[in-house]
Image (spheres, rainbow, N blue to C red):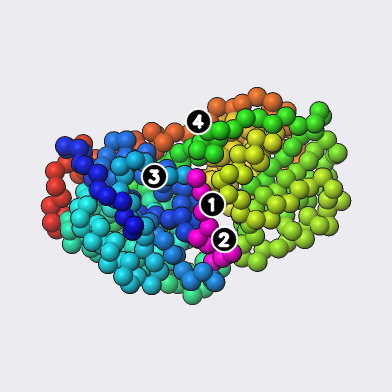
């Protein structure tokens, strides 16, 4: 079934269609799209359109797992889902537009994270404008870092995104840092924007029970894809200077051919105290790694947001995270946070020692999907969508 059956619409409740990554090319945005849709569904009539096949599989860093059933997360009961749109567009894009026309929402919310979806998003935005549907763009980052390294991809997005921005009535970002980065990249004029802090990834922690480790041993965990900006090589260097009371588990899939961390692991003087799981693990395994950790270390060189950070906070674990990008705002209110400067293994090692002192108790996660939904509600009000919105008016922005 390409789409589930439409749910009954509550009287006066604004109708929202959320568009984002589906499960076929699984990533953190797949989880975010689902969690956001479910959160908004608590107060609006929500439907979802999923981007199914983002690009030719051979070009995707996780090509070996494409299409595998790795996630346990599901969309809420009664939330219609169209799954989904393929990069070549025919006939999936026409069917998605038909789904949009049938749902006739007040707002179309597009999750932005990669230029691979730009042509599909532009087609959906054009259709939305013709139907009088307002378009909101949620930026997870201005452009994927791997795409930015390819000059043709960067040029394509910078040139082709302007028609999409011209059809945008409102913008959502995760932090003030992201808002400033977006403003420096694109002149959005008077387009309203709101900061919607990332909600918790507590679906991974729902069945979690702590697994005690050996006495006197602090178990560190790095979790997430292995890419140039993630700084894992800094952690490996730092870990090599730590004593035998520390153990490190690295769980992640290598992207963009970034094999330097793997080489550093093999050459590390502490190799016998490092466990390396070099693959994308399914949801059924995620809890076990966090339950068996005493602290999480995320040594990013740059970042706008981090799914592993939110998984760590949902588990209540101490987390050493570099003070880059939007992570300062995301992790700042969390009592288990220890900040470190990026690209500095010596400082990272010292901060790991501080985090070890915070282990042994559960820290409260300050993030909330209700808070995220409230930010969306503020933006919807600003663009003329309220709790008593009637049918969209053709031609309205």
Secondary element type, mark 4: loop
Q: Is residue 39 visible?
A: yes
Which span of residues is magenta-colored? 60-72
Q: Is residue 256 magenta?
A: no
Residue in the picture at 38% in, 33% down: 370
Residue 122 higher or lower than 272, as above or below:
below
Mark 2, residue position: 65
- Sequence-earlier tag: 1 or 4: 1
Query: Residue 92 appears at what percent x and percent y?
Result: 33, 66
Residue at the bottom extreme of this rendering:
152
- Which secondary structure class fits the magenta region best? loop
Mark 3, residue position: 75
Q: Is residue 65 magenta?
A: yes
What is the number of the mark on residue 366?
A: 4
The CA distance from mark 4 to mark 2 is 33 Å
- Sequence-earlier tag: 2 or 3: 2
Residue 76 higher or lower than 189, as above or below:
above
Q: Is residue 62 left or right of residue 342?
A: left
Q: Quadrant of the N terminus?
A: bottom left
Residue in the picture at 17% in, 38% down: 12
Mark 1, residue position: 70
What is the number of the mark on residue 362?
A: none
The CA distance from mark 2 to mark 1 is 9 Å
Residue in the picture at 71% in, 63% down: 259
Secondary element type, mark 2: helix
Residue in the picture at 61% in, 26% down: 362
Q: Is residue 263 left or right of residue 370?
A: right
Residue 6 higher or lower than 144, as above or below:
above
Looking at the rendered image, the disc whose residue lies closer to the viewer, 4 or 3, is 3
| Contact between labelled residues 2 and 4, with CB atoms less than 8 Å apart | no
In front here: 108 or 83?
83
């Amino acid at each position: 079934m390409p789409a589930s059956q439409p749910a009954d619409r509550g009287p006066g409740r604004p109708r929202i269609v959320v568009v984002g990554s589906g499960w076929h090319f699984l990533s953190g945005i797949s989880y975010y799209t689902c969690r956001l849709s479910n959160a908004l569904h608590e107060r609006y009539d929500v439907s979802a359109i999923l981007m199914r096949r983002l690009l030719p599989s051979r070009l995707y860093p996780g090509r070996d797992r494409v299409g595998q059933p790795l996630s346990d997360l599901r969309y809420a009961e009664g939330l219609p889902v169209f799954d989904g749109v393929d990069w070549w567009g025919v006939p999936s894009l026409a069917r998605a537009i038909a789904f949009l026309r049938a749902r006739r929402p007040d707002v179309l919310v597009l999750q932005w994270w990669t230029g691979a979806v730009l042509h599909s998003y532009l087609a959906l935005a054009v259709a939305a404008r013709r139907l009088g549907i307002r378009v909101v763009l949620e930026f997870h980052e201005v452009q994927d870092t791997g795409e930015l390294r390819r000059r043709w991809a960067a040029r394509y997005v910078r040139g082709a995104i302007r028609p999409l921005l011209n059809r945008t009535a409102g913008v959502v970002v995760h932090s003030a840092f992201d808002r400033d980065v977006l403003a420096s990249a694109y002149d959005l004029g008077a387009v309203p924007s709101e900061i919607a802090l990332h909600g918790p990834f507590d679906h991974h922690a729902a069945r979690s029970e702590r697994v005690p480790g050996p006495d006197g041993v602090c178990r560190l965990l790095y979790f997430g894809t292995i890419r140039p900006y993630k700084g894992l090589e800094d952690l490996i260097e730092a870990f090599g200077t730590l004593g035998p009371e520390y153990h490190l588990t690295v769980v992640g899939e290598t992207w963009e051919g970034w094999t330097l961390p793997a080489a550093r692991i093999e050459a590390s003087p502490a190799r016998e105290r490092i466990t390396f799981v070099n693959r994308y693990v399914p949801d059924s395994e995620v809890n076990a790694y966090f339950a068996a950790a005493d602290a999480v270390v995320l040594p990013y060189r740059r970042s706008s947001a981090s799914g592993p950070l939110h998984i760590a906070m949902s588990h209540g674990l101490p987390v050493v995270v570099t003070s880059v990008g939007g992570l300062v705002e995301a992790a700042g209110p969390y009592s288990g946070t220890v900040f470190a400067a990026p690209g500095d293994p010596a400082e990272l090692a010292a901060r790991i020692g501080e985090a070890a002192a915070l282990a042994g108790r559960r820290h409260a996660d300050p993030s909330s999907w209700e808070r995220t939904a409230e930010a969306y509600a503020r933006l919807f009000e600003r663009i003329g969508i309220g709790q008593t919105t009637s049918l969209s008016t053709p031609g309205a922005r």
